[in-house]
Amino acid sequence: MRLEGVWLRYHRRGPWVLRETDVAIGPAEVAVVLGRNGVGKSTLLQLAAGVLPPTRGRVVDRPATVGWVPERFPADQPFTVGAYLTAMARVSGLSAADADRAVRRWVDRLGLARFHGVRLPQLSKGTAQKVGLAQALLRPPGLLVLDEPWEGLDAAARDLVPEVIGEVLADGGAVLVSDHRGETVRLPGARHWSVAEGTVTEAAPSGGAATVVVELSVPAAGAAAAVARLRADGHHVLRIRDAAAPPPATRPDSGSPSTAGAVPGSGAGQSGERGRPDPAEVPVSGGPDVDEAPASGAPGRPGPAPEVAR
Ligand SMILES: Nc1ncnc2c1ncn2[C@@H]1O[C@H](COP(=O)(O)OP(=O)(O)OP(=O)(O)O)[C@@H](O)[C@H]1O
C-alpha cells in the first residue's frame, strides 16, 4: 500500500497536518509511527486505513481487508459485546457460521468471555480496547492499523499485541502501529516512520536493530535438513539445543567450542557440546544478545531450539 503525494487538512482554510507524504508498506512488513503529541500520527494512520480521504494525493494498493483499531474505542453504542462483534463480523462479509466461529475465537483469546452479554458503554476502558482489537481481527486483515493499541491494556493483554501482530505478519499482512509508550521494542524488525512538522520520514534501521533472533522448533530427525536449508537461505544459525533443555540464563562464554552446525544425532556436537554457541557466530556486541532473544517480541510464538537469526 502506498500514500502518494498525500496532503491532509481538516478544514478548508485550516493548517496542513500532513504535506506531500510518500510512504509505502508491503506484505509482512510492520512500521511503527512515532512523533510527539499532536504531530499527525493518528491522521496518518486514518489515511492509511481509509478512515480519512486525502485532501490531495492518493492512497493506492490498499488491501481489501483492513483492520482498524482506533486510539479510543467508541463504546457509546447500545450493543452487547457479543452482538457488536457478531454484527462487525457479518459486515466484514463472513457467513453466520464463520462469524460465530471468529467471534468465539477472539472473545476467548482476549479474555472477553465474561463480557459477552455486557453492553459496550458499561465496559472499562481496557476491556473496551480489547473489543476494539477483536473487531479488527475477526477477518484476517491484509492491513492492520493500530493507533496506540497498548493504551489502557493490562500487562497480559499488552503482551498479546505483539503476538497478534506477529501472526498477521506471518499471514502476509502489513501492520502500521503508533506508539508513544516505547512498546515498540516488542516489535523487532519494525520500520520506523517519524512524523514531524507535517512530514513523514523513515528512520534508517540502527545497527543491530536490523537483525532479530527467531526461535523455532523442528523435529529432531529433520534438524540437519532444516539447518542446511536455513543456511542455504542465508540465515545465521546461532545454536541448537534439546527442546526439553531450558535456554541458557547467561550469555555463553566466548571460549566454548563450535557446535552451531551440530544437529542432534548427526555425530557432531553431541552431549557436552550441544547447546553451546559458536563464538564466531554469536555477535559480541551491537547485535542481538542470543540469550536475551525477544521471546515475547519475536514475530511468531516463542518456542524451543534451534535459534536462528536472519
Ligand atoms: N477531527 C479533527 N478536526 C480538526 N483537527 C483535528 C482533528 N483531528 C486531529 N486534528 C488536529 O490535527 C493535528 C494532528 O492530530 P493527530 O491526532 O493526528 O496527532 P497525533 O500525533 O496522533 O497526536 P497524539 O499523539 O496526541 O494522539 C492536531 O493539531 C489535531 O488537533
Image: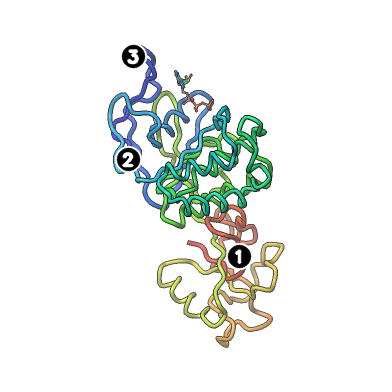
Pointer 3: what residue?
A: 12
28 vs 278: above or below: above
Q: Amino acid at mark 2?
A: Arg
| Residue 29 visible somewhere in the drawing | no
Numbered disc 2: secondary structure: strand
Pointers 3 and 1 in contact (C-beta within 8 Å): no
| Disc marking residue 2 | 2
Q: Amino acid at mark 1?
A: Gly
Query: Between tags 2 and 3, which lies in front?
Result: 3
| Disc marking residue 98 | none
Pointer 1: what residue?
A: 303
Q: Where is residue 75 drawn, in percent x and y?
A: 58, 30
Numbered disc 1: secondary structure: loop
Residue located at (50% from left, 30% from top): 35
Q: Where is residue 86 drawn, in percent x and y?
A: 51, 44
| Residue 37 visible somewhere in the drawing | yes
Q: Residue furthest bottom?
A: 267
Q: CA distance from mark 1 to mark 2?
A: 34 Å
Is 158 on the left-hand or right-hand side of 202?
Answer: right
Q: Residue furthest right?
A: 249
- Earlier in the chain: of badge 1 and badge 2, it is 2
Q: How would you rate the neighbour count of disc 2 (Cα within 10 Å): few for under 14, some for 14-19, many for 20 or more?
A: some
Residue sitting nearer the eye, 59 or 96: 96
Label total for image:
3
